[in-house]
Image: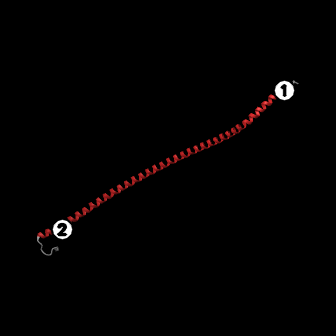
Amino acid sequence: SVIDPFPFELSAAVVAMFHSMNQSRHDLKVGLHQAQQSYEMKLQELDSHHSQQLHQLRQRAQKALEEAEQRYQADLSDLRKRLEAEQSSRSAAQYHIESLQRNLRHLRDELEEKREDVSELPLLRETCRHQRNELRELQKLKQQLPEL
């Protein structure tokens, strides 16, 4: 025999109300489950979207960092070349300065020699005048001497 879940007699309206409440409870559970699934799907979509955005941001940041590093290396290389050119130019200028200083010393030495020569000039003039006079005297003597 079938056991009646309701041992006492309930009116059809009460039974209908219980069934309606059970159905509503079931509908609420199904609705809640669907809402929870929908919420979790939305969370997964958002998480996936944020992960994608984060990945793109990391890629852009990495690319920007690499480009900045390349610019830094290029600038550093350019500065090295300019420094080498400046040092080379400075070396050439230094060599030129030293060469000019050597030339100047040489010219000073020559000038000093010429000054010494010039200081001897009066003595040389005097000697020359004296020798001319002696030569004249000798020529006079020669003319006076009979030819042998």
Number of the front mark, 1 or 2: 1
Q: Nearer the viewer, residue 121 or 20?
A: 121
Q: Which of pointers 1 and 2 lies earlier in the amino acid sequence? A: 2
For the residues labelled 1 and 2, say whether their Cβ atoms are less than 8 Å apart: no
Q: On the rendered structure, is 86 left or right of 19?
A: right
Placement of 139 over or under 6, stated as above or below? above
Specify the quadrant of the image occupied by residue 34: bottom left
| Residue under the image location 82 percent in, 26 percent down | 140
Q: On the rendered structure, is 52 left or right of 135?
A: left
Q: Name the amino acid type tagged 2.
A: Asn
Which quadrant does the N terminus fall into? bottom left
Q: Position of residue 126 (x, y in %)?
A: 75, 34
Q: Name the amino acid type tagged 1.
A: Lys
Q: On the rendered structure, is 137 left or right of 101?
A: right
Which quadrant does the C terminus fall into? top right
Dot 2, how many residues are within 10 Å of its Cα: few (below 14), some (14-19), or many (20+)? few
Q: Which residue is mark 2?
A: 22
Q: Position of residue 10 (x, y in %)?
A: 12, 72
In space, the residues marked 1 and 2 are separated at their CA atoms by 172 Å
| Residue under the image location 18 percent in, 68 percent down | 22
Specify the quadrant of the image occupied by residue 15: bottom left
Dot 1, how many residues are within 10 Å of its Cα: few (below 14), some (14-19), or many (20+)? few
Q: Nearer the viewer, residue 45 or 57?
A: 57
Placement of 36 over or under 147, stated as above or below? below
Q: Which residue is mark 1?
A: 142
Q: Position of residue 69 (x, y in %)?
A: 45, 51
Query: Please, what secondary structure does the residue beneath circle 2 have?
Result: helix
Query: Please, what secondary structure does the residue beneath circle 1 have?
Result: helix
Q: Position of residue 21 (x, y in %)?
A: 17, 68
| Residue under the image location 80 percent in, 29 percent down | 135
